[in-house]
C-alpha cells in the first residue's frame, strides 16, 4: 500500500451520560476535528458492560470518516463509580476494538479536569447533580458525594431548592418571616397556604431543580433562606473537595462545571470562600468548553502511554 493510500489515524472521545452520548473524533497527528455529534442514549443505565462496549464501538464505527482508522479511544461514562466498574468497562471496550486501539475509560465526572487542560485535577460538578472526582497517584478513582439530592448532592440545583425550603419551613415554625421567599414559593409551587407545601413539593419532586434560578433571584433580593441554602451547599461541596484530597487524590487544580457552578457567580464565590476557609490552595477555574474534549484528551493520553510501553518493550 502506498503512503497516499494508507489510512490516517484518528483519536475519539466519548462523554456518555444516562441520557446522552457526545462523541468527538480528531486527526491523531494534526488535531483537526473530524466529527462532533450528540445524540440520545436513554438506555445506557440498563446495559451490561459488554452491551455498553458494543454501543461505543457501533457509535464510533458509524461516525469515523472514511480513510481513517482509530488509534485510541477515550470514554468518560456514567456508572463508572468505582475502580472495579471502571476497569470492567475498559476491558470490555478494549476487547471490542482489539489490540490495535489504545483505550482508557473513566467516570464521566473526571472529564471536567481533563477538558480544563489538566492531567491531574479535581473535577467538581454542580448542576443537576453534584460530585467531586479525581484519581490517586496510583490511578484509582475517588468520588465524593454524587448520591442524589435525597441523600446528598450538595451543590446541585434540586438540593439547593430543597434546603431553602427546609430553612423556610423551619423559620415558619419559629414565626420568623421571609417574605421574599414566601412570594417565590407561592408563585413557583402554587401554594398560598403554607401547610399545603409538602404536597406541592411531592408533586414537583422530579422538576425541583428547575426552581434553582428562582432561589438565586431570592438571594439577590435579600431572602435569608435562599442565601443560607446557597452558602451551605457551596461550603459542603468545598468540604467534599477536602475529603477527596484526604483520600489521596492527586491534583494540581480544581476545575468546576455544571449549570450552578458556571451560571451562578454567587455560588462560585461561596465555593471559592469555602475552599480557602478549609485551606485548599489549589487554583480554581471553571470549565469553558465541553467535557467531551476531556475524553479526547484521555484518548491521547492512552495513545501516549501505549507508545511509551512499545518503546520500553523494544529496549528490552
Image (cartoon, rainbow, N blue to C red):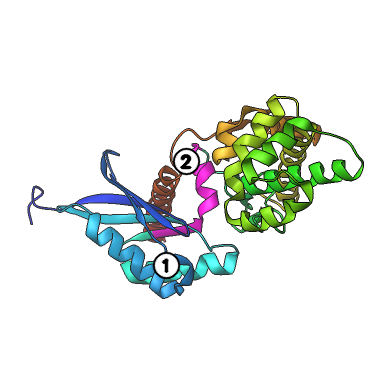
Tell me where residue 292 appears, x and y as whole percent: 41, 46
Reading the image, the residue beneath label 1 is: 43
State the image quarter where residue 71 is shown. Answer: bottom left
What residue lies at 67% left-to-right and 53% top-to-bottom? 200
Q: What residue appears at the point 44 percent right and 72 percent down from the top-left corner?
A: 47
Q: Position of residue 216 (x, y in %)?
A: 66, 32
| Residue 58 position (above or below residue 221) | below
- Sequence-wise, the earlier of marks 2 and 1 is 1
Q: Give the quarter of the image for residue 311.
A: bottom left
Up/down of 38 relative to 316, above or below: above
Query: What SS does tag 2 mark?
Result: helix
Of the 4 image quadrants, the one containing the N terminus is: bottom left
Q: How many tags in the picture?
A: 2
Mark 2 vs mark 1: in front: 1
Q: Position of residue 196 (x, y in %)?
A: 74, 52
Secondary element at image label 1 = loop
Left or right for 25, reference 297: left
Q: Nearer the viewer, residue 161 or 24?
A: 161
Mark 2 near mark 1, Cβ–Cβ under 8 Å? Answer: no
How far across and how far down the image is residue 46, in percent?
47, 72
Magenta stretch, residue numbers: 103-117
Nearer to us in this view, 170 or 312: 170
Residue named by callout 2: 115
Instruction: Specify the quadrant that holds the C terminus.
Output: bottom left
Q: Name above or below for residue 272 compared with residue 292.
A: above
Q: Is-magenta flag for residue 107?
A: yes
301 in the magenta segment: no
Task: Using the image as rendered, state which of residue 202 and residue 259 is in the foreground.
Answer: 202
Which mark, residue 263?
none
Amino acid at each position: 500500500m502506498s503512503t497516499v493510500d494508507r489510512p490516517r489515524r484518528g483519536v475519539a472521545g466519548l462523554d456518555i451520560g444516562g441520557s446522552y452520548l457526545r462523541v468527538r473524533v480528531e486527526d491523531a497527528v494534526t488535531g483537526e476535528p473530524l466529527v462532533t455529534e450528540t445524540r440520545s442514549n436513554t438506555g445506557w443505565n440498563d446495559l451490561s458492560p459488554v452491551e455498553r462496549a458494543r454501543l461505543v464501538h457501533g457509535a464510533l464505527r458509524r461516525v469515523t470518516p472514511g480513510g481513517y482508522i482509530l488509534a485510541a479511544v477515550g470514554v468518560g461514562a456514567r456508572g463508572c463509580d468505582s475502580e472495579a466498574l471502571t476497569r470492567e468497562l475498559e476491558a470490555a471496550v478494549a476487547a471490542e476494538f482489539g489490540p490495535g486501539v489504545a483505550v482508557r475509560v473513566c467516570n464521566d465526572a473526571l472529564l471536567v479536569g481533563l477538558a480544563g487542560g489538566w492531567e491531574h485535577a479535581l473535577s467538581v460538578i454542580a448542576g443537576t447533580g453534584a460530585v467531586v472526582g479525581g484519581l490517586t497517584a496510583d490511578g484509582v478513582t475517588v468520588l465524593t458525594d454524587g448520591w442524589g439530592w435525597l441523600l446528598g448532592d450538595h451543590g446541585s440545583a434540586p438540593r439547593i431548592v430543597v434546603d431553602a425550603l427546609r430553612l423556610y419551613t423551619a423559620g415558619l415554625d419559629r414565626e420568623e418571616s421571609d417574605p421574599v421567599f414566601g412570594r417565590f414559593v407561592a408563585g413557583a409551587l402554587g401554594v398560598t397556604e403554607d401547610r399545603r407545601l409538602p404536597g406541592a413539593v411531592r408533586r414537583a419532586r422530579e422538576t425541583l431543580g428547575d426552581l434553582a434560578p428562582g432561589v438565586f433571584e431570592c438571594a439577590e433580593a435579600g431572602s435569608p433562606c435562599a442565601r443560607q441554602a446557597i452558602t451551605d451547599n457551596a461550603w459542603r461541596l468545598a468540604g467534599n473537595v477536602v475529603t477527596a484530597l484526604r483520600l489521596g487524590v492527586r491534583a494540581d487544580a480544581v476545575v468546576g462545571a455544571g449549570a450552578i457552578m458556571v451560571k451562578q457567580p454567587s455560588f462560585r464565590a461561596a465555593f471559592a470562600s469555602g475552599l480557602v476557609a478549609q485551606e485548599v490552595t489549589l487554583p480554581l477555574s471553571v470549565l469553558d468548553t465541553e467535557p467531551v474534549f476531556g475524553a479526547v484528551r484521555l484518548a491521547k493520553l492512552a495513545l501516549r502511554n501505549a507508545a511509551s510501553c512499545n518503546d520500553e518493550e523494544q529496549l528490552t
